[in-house]
Image: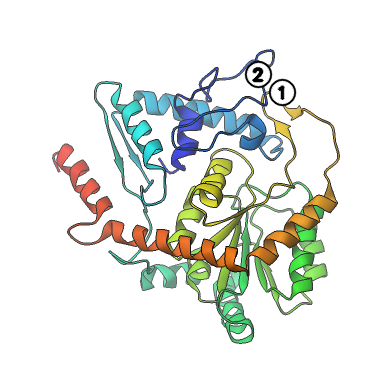
């Protein structure tokens, strides 16, 4: 299981709400303002859990939730990429207890499952080499040169890395342009990955921003290379489980822009419970997946969004931002110990799993 622990419980497990989250909810009983209570997670409403209108993906997401639930119910046990150094211990315990309810099945939390040198937070040199060399059109080299240049001109922790993963992209280009304009105005260098955007959108963005030497826009980038580079300071992310874990192992604080599934829970946990970053909220669409529409037909408040962007970018370079960075670094240091030779927590979990399987 590769999802964030709270997201897995939301999608598949029992929650303190009127219905299991992975079951289709009825429009006449659904309450958008009712809290869904997941062990170890902050209380969140329907709108909190679905901050963006994901369009046609809503049906695919619901089918995926149902499939994952059926798989979890029928499997002989569960391996996860979760790590108690970051994930809520209460939530991980609830997952283990839920899985054990059926015939004493066992759960093994093996995260972080990343190519780190055992016992450290350093990505293996071979993994970084392969990542750079397999980027299309030589973009891996382009990225490293950009980061090296920013390191010389702006110093450590200066670059904002922006990626919404391979499945998501903001539905409003206006929101994204306000964010990028704010960075340009402040002379903050940024690297934008756009795996899911359409060609017309990217052409417009490149025309607007690539005249600036402090910006780089590419479809794919070597993410582990970026996050481990000294110039990388902040990761603006949708909150995918892998990306969050990669960032934390490198001590990189994040600014969350979640869309759906486990992402809102992951971002809330990262930004508020663990205090390792910030969360954007003014770009929310007030969306309800059950009713497949906004419950209030209101236009987004772009002034409020512009203010939030400015406030968050400013806070990133204050004592508050430094506190969040230190917290991210501490989490990363603890994650790095998980696979230490002999006594690493994840290594011991893997040994227990192999013993259980008789290997």
Q: Which residue is mark 2?
A: 30
Q: Earlier in the sequence, mark 2 or mark 1?
A: 2
Q: Which mark is residue 179?
A: none
167 vs 250, nearest the viewer: 250
- Measured as percent of width and height from the top left, residue 154 is found at 63, 82
Depth check: 93 or 103 in front?
93
The residue lying at 36 percent from left, 48 percent from top is 83
Q: Are marks 2 and 1 in contact (CB under 8 Å)?
A: yes
How was this image coloured? rainbow
- Residue 269, percent from left and from top: 51, 46
Measured from the top left, where is residue 173 in percent x and y?
A: 79, 53
Seen at 53% across and 40% down, the residue is: 262
On screen, 150 above or below 112? below
What residue is shown with label 1?
A: 291
* Picture quadrant where residue 300 is located: top right
Of tags 2 and 1, which is closer to the observer? Answer: 2
């Amino acid at each position: 299981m590769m999802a964030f622990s709270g997201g897995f419980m939301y999608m598949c497990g029992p929650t303190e709400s009127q219905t299991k989250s992975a079951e289709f909810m009825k429009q006449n009983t659904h309450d958008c303002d009712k809290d869904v209570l997941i062990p170890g997670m902050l209380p969140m409403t329907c709108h909190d859990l679905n901050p963006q209108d994901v369009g046609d993906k809503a049906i695919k997401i619901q089918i995926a939730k149902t499939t994952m639930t059926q798989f979890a119910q029928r499997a002989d046990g569960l391996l996860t990429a979760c790590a108690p150094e970051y994930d809520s211990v209460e939530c991980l315990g609830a997952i283990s207890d839920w899985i054990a309810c059926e015939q004493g099945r066992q759960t093994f939390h093996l995260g972080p499952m990343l190519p780190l040198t055992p016992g450290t937070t350093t990505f293996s040199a071979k993994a970084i080499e392969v990542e750079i060399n397999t980027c299309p059109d030589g973009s891996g080299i382009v990225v490293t040169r950009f980061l090296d240049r920013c390191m010389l001109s702006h110093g450590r922790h200066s670059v904002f890395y922006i990626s919404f993963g391979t499945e998501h992209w903001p539905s409003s280009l206006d929101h994204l342009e306000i964010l990028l304009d704010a960075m340009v105005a402040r002379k903050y260098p940024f690297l934008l990955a756009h795996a899911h955007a359409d060609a017309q959108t990217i052409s417009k963005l490149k025309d607007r921003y690539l005249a600036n030497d402090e910006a780089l826009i590419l479809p794919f980038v070597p993410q582990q290379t970026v996050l481990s580079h000294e110039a990388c300071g902040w990761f603006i992310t949708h909150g995918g489980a892998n990306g969050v874990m990669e960032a934390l192992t490198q001590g990189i604080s994040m600014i969350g822009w979640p869309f759906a599934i486990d992402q809102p829970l992951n971002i809330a946990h990262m930004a508020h419970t663990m205090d390792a970053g910030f969360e954007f909220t003014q770009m929310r669409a007030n969306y309800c997946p059950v009713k497949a529409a906004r419950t209030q037909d209101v236009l987004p408040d772009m002034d409020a969004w512009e203010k939030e962007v400015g406030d968050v970018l400013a806070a990133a370079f204050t004592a508050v931002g430094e506190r969040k960075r230190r917290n991210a670094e501490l989490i990363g240091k603890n994650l790095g110990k998980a696979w230490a030779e002999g006594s690493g927590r994840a290594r011991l979990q893997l040994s227990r799993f192999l013993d259980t399987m008789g290997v």
